[in-house]
């Protein structure tokens, strides 16, 4: 028989680990796959704590080992990280290989003015397979502001051929073109199409047909896709419950919408003054069973990144 005093003692010892993984205000712990590294270590943590996020994946660019270390020291066990270097430069492969040796768990986000099936990204797809890490790609065909230029272009026409050509690469799709193409009637006419989704869109098919493709629900693009047609969303989440990942791509300061949540993107005004993480968690929770919600906001990221929950 365990005494009451001993029992309480056992609980106290177990508490710190428990606090990380326990259900929070969302009814499940939350992993944010798409958190852009902020300069000040504490600012990263402020967004997680404000939005009720348990752990986040830092998307970084360039040599950031010291910053990542400082954040890990501030909040042990709450951050993983992905790395990017300029993939149009010849040393990108060396730099990324070193980043993975130093602990980066993926490439991303890859957001460059190149073709989705061009030589620069093909090199990254191949290297990601060799290093056994996922690659997070930003697909966008419509400018958010004048002369922005497009990113990883040709998604609708050519990306399936990449999924076939690189079957050992784990792809995570993200951004405007990826999510707008959930609807079969999309032809690059707007960054964020609204209204009912025409069933049978390219992204829906690719997620169903290719085990090496996952979807990152972050940003206005992901939130818009989840919000635009409530008759579509629950079945979509059910169909791809093992392939979808919660991400915020939120730039707000406090996890409650302070500051700017979607910088440099007037087309995303629907999220102005709001925390994208909170908005996306809300629509996911409303549209999925508790079991599916838990997979999308927590379990899937751990499986994909091969990290313990
Ligand atoms: Zn992006
Ligand atoms: Zn936020």
Image (spheres, helix red, strand yellow):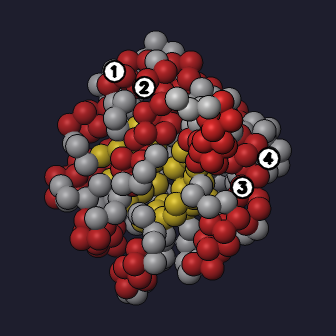
Mark 3 and mark 4 lie on one chain; the one further toward the N terminus is 3
Mark 1 and mark 2 lie on one chain; the one further toward the N terminus is 1
Q: Which mark is residue 199?
A: 1
Mark 2 and mark 3 lie on one chain; the one further toward the N terminus is 3
Front position in the image: 203 or 100: 100
Task: Report helix, strand or loop for mark 2.
Answer: helix
Task: Report helix, strand or loop for mark 1.
Answer: loop
Please indicate whether residue 21 sits to the left or right of residue 146 in the image.
Answer: left
- Please name which of the two marks, 3 or 4, marks the residue nearer to the observer: 3
Q: Quadrant of residue 103?
A: bottom left
Residue ID at (42%, 64%)? 105
Badge 2: how crowded within 10 Å, few (<14), some, or many (20+)? many
Residue ID at (22%, 42%)? 210
Residue ID at (56%, 23%)? 285
Badge 4: how crowded within 10 Å, few (<14), some, or many (20+)? some
Q: Which residue is mark 3?
A: 45
Q: Is mark 4 within 8 Å of ligand 2?
A: yes
Question: Residue placed farthest to the top in the image?
Answer: 231
Q: CA distance from mark 2 to mark 3?
A: 26 Å
- Please name which of the two marks, 1 or 4, marks the residue nearer to the observer: 4
């Amino acid at each position: 028989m365990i005494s009451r005093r001993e029992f309480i003692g056992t609980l106290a010892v177990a508490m710190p680990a428990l606090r990380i993984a326990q259900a929070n205000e969302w009814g499940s712990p939350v992993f944010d796959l798409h958190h852009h590294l902020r300069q000040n270590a504490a600012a990263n943590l402020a967004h997680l704590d404000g939005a009720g996020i348990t752990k986040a994946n830092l998307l970084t660019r360039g040599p950031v080992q010291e910053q990542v270390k400082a954040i890990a020291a501030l909040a042990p066990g709450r951050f993983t990280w992905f790395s990017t270097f300029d993939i149009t430069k010849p040393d990108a492969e060396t730099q990324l290989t070193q980043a993975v040796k130093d602990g980066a768990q993926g490439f991303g986000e890859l957001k460059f003015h190149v073709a989705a099936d061009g030589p620069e990204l093909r090199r990254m797809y191949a290297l990601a397979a060799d290093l056994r890490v996922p690659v997070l790609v930003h697909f966008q065909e419509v400018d958010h502001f004048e002369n922005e230029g497009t990113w990883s272009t040709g998604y609708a026409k050519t990306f399936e051929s990449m999924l076939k050509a690189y079957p050992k690469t784990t792809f995570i799709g993200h951004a405007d073109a990826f999510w707008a193409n959930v609807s079969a009637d999309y032809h690059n006419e707007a960054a964020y199409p609204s209204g009912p989704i025409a069933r049978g869109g390219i992204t829906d098919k690719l997620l169903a047909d290719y085990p090496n493709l996952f979807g990152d629900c972050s940003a206005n693009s992901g939130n818009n896709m989840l919000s635009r047609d409530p008759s579509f969303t629950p079945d979509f989440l059910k169909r791809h419950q093992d392939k979808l990942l919660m991400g915020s791509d939120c730039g707000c300061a406090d996890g409650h919408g302070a500051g700017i949540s979607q910088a440099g993107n007037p087309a995303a005004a629907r999220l102005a003054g709001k925390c994208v993480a909170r908005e996306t968690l809300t629509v996911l929770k409303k549209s999925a069973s508790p079991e599916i919600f838990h997979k999308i906001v927590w379990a899937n990221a751990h499986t994909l990144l091969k990290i313990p929950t």
